[in-house]
Image (tube, grey):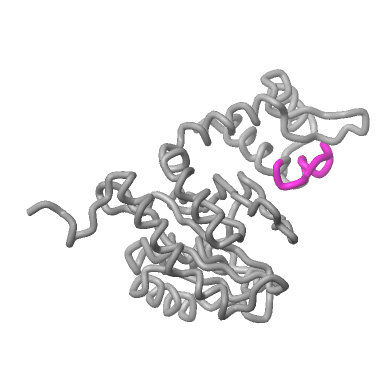
Amino acid sequence: MSQSLARALRLLDLVADGTSTLTDLAEATGSHKSTVLRLLRDLEDHGLVQHGADHRYVLGPHLFRLAAQALDDLDVRSTAAPRLRELRDTVRQTVHVAVFDGRRATYVDKLEPREAPVRMASRIGNPVLLHCTAVGKVFLAALPPEEAAALLAAVERPRLTPRTLVDVGDLLREVETVRADGWAQDHAENETFVNCVAAPVHGPDGRVLAAVSISVPDVLLPHEAVLALVPPLLSATADISRACGYRPPEESPR
C-alpha cells in the first residue's frame, strides 16, 4: 500500500471517529497540515469527505453509497433477513448482526421491535469491541485458541463497567466457555444497563460468517430473563446457517 493511500485511509478512520478539524487531524496523524489538507481535498473531490462553513470535516455522501452497496453485497445479511425479523418479533427485543474481518467486528444490521419503549444507541457500521460484547466473544471463540490469545493481547481492552473483563487469561477462559456452549453473553460488560446474548451463523465450510445478538436494557428485562432468550436465538441462527449452506455433522450426508 502506498504511503499516501495509507494516510488517506487513516484520515477517513479519524473523521469517522469524530476528529474533524485540520489541526486535530494533522496532530493525530503526525503529518504537516499542508500534507493533510492535500489529502483531504483529494478525498473531498471524490465525495468521501466534506466540510462546512465551520471547517470541520465529516464523511461524504459517496462513502455512504459505497457502504450501502457493501451491505447489500453481504449475502448472509439478505439471507438472514426474514428469519431475523421473525426472531425480533418473537422476543420483542433489538436484534443485531455483526461480521468479523479477522481483527475487527462491525454491526451490519439492526432490527428494533415495532414498538420499542427504549431505543438502543448502536448503529449499523459501528465497530464492536471484542472483549466485552457477546458478538465479540462469538468471533473470538471461532478462532483457534492461540489466535484468540494473540488478538486479545494486541487489541485495546478498556474497562467500561465494573463487570468488564480486561485480563487476557480471564477472557480466554470466558471464550472457552463460549466455544463449549455455542453461545455468548455480555452481562453488563459493555454498558452497565444492557445485557446481551449472541450466537454464530456458520457457512457451508463451518466457518463463522456472522454473529447474531439480542440486546436488552435492564429496564425491560432482568439478566435471567435475557438468558431465557437463548433457545429462540439458537433456533434462529441454526435456521440461518442452514440457509447459508451449513450442515451440522449429524446432518451431513454420509
Tell me the quarter of the image containing the C terminus.
Answer: bottom left
- Percent across and percent down for residue 219 are 72, 73
Against 176, is 89 above or below? above
Residue depicted at 36% across the width and 61% down the height: 143
Residue depicted at 72% across the width and 34% down the height: 59
Q: Is residue 23 magenta?
A: yes
The magenta-colored residue range is: 16-26
Q: Is residue 116 magenta?
A: no
The front one of 172 and 217 is: 217
Q: How many labels were placed on the picture?
A: 0
Indicate left or right for 233 with 27 as reference: left
- Percent across and percent down for residue 21 are 83, 39
Indicate left or right for 221 with 84 as reference: right
- Percent across and percent down for residue 185 are 51, 71
The front one of 24 and 87 is: 87
Residue depicted at 68% across the width and 38% down the height: 11
Q: Looking at this rendering, what residue extends furthest in the top direction?
A: 45
Against 218, is 56 above or below? above
Indicate left or right for 56 with 145 as reference: right
Q: Looking at this rendering, what residue extends furthest in the left direction?
A: 254
- Percent across and percent down for residue 234 are 40, 63
Indicate left or right for 134 with 202 as reference: right
Say which quarter of the image contains residue 122.
Answer: bottom right
Residue depicted at 53% across the width and 78% down the height: 167
